[in-house]
Every structure is written in C-alpha cells, then in structure tokens.
Amino acid sequence: MAETAEKPERPIRAAGCVLWRRSPLDGELEIALVHRPKYDDWSHPKGKLKRGESALDGAVREVAEETGMRCRPGAPLPTAHYVVAGRPKEVRYWAAEATGGAFSPNTEVDRLLWLPPAPARNRLTHDRDRSLIDALLDAFRLPDRRP
C-alpha cells in the first residue's frame, strides 16, 4: 500500500505597509494604525492580493483602500507568517511614507490613528505587528523613544 503525502496547503498571500509620516506639529515620526471593526483589532494596513497582483502593488493598493493615503514604498520589512482558520497566511510588508490623501471610515476600517512608535506598539493587537515597528525603526536607524 503506497503512502500518499498530503500536499501542503498554499498560503493565503497578502501584503501591507507600515505607513509613516512626520507629524505636522513637531516633525516627529508617526505610524498609522487602522481599526477593523470585523475583528475589533488595531493593525497595519494590509490585505489579500488579487490574482496576478505583485505583493508591492497589493501593499500600496491596500494602504489606499484602508487609509485613503497615497504612499511611497521604501525598505522591505519582515514577512509575517501565521495561520488563519487552519490555513497558512503570508503577509509581505514594506515601510511606506504617506505622501497625501485623507481618511474616510468604511465598513472594513472605521478608524485611523497616527501615533509615535511606542504608543503605536502598545496599541497594536497582535505581537507579530509590534515587531514591524521595530523593523521600521531599524530600517531608518530611528530612535525608539520607548517610555
């Protein structure tokens, strides 16, 4: 009797950005976080890729859809790997500077916050998202200013 090896399930492919800007008040670094009412969580803007879409194009599209912001992608950040409903998910991330736009709440994202790195890290719901702030700071060699 021949054994049949189960084919590993293909991961859900997604992409997003750690969106940042300089505060209009004092020039300090601020990071955008989105609140998703469906999950009642705070995260970085991200979403599933469309068929044939590159990860970078998907990341920029998701930032626009979820935050209303245009952005300039920069350094690649670590890829997140986790399981959703029993299926592996892979989310590629980039640092991205906000270059303009305006947020409008919608059914997917009802709130957007711009926070300094330490408060942003504390507001994020998932640990895996917190390490992306550290990676952003490392990419730009920016001070953390943890409390």
Image (tube, helix red, strand yellow):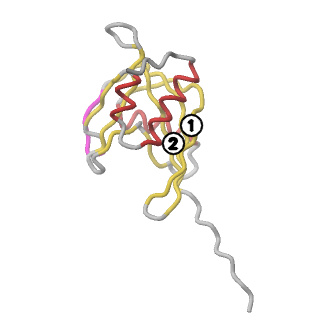
Residue type of the residue flagged with mark 1: Leu
Q: Is residue 120 above or below residue 144?
A: below
Dot 1, how many residues are within 10 Å of its Cα: few (below 14), some (14-19), or many (20+)?
some
- Residue at point 48%, 33% (across, down): 17
- Residue at point 43%, 39% (across, down): 62
Dot 2 and dot 1 residues touching (CB under 8 Å): yes
- Residue 5 position, x and y percent, is 68, 76
Which circle's residue, 2 or 1, is located before the other in the chain?
A: 2
List the residue tagged with mark 2.
Answer: 15
Q: How many marks?
A: 2
Using the rendered view, name the quadrant where residue 46 is placed.
top left
Secondary structure of the residue carrying tag 1 is helix
Q: Is residue 105 magenta?
A: yes
Judge by depth and name the residue closer to the eye, 76 or 130: 130
List the residue tagged with mark 1.
Answer: 56
Q: Is residue 19 above or below residue 61?
A: above
Q: Is residue 14 above or below residue 68?
A: below
Residue type of the residue flagged with mark 2: Ala
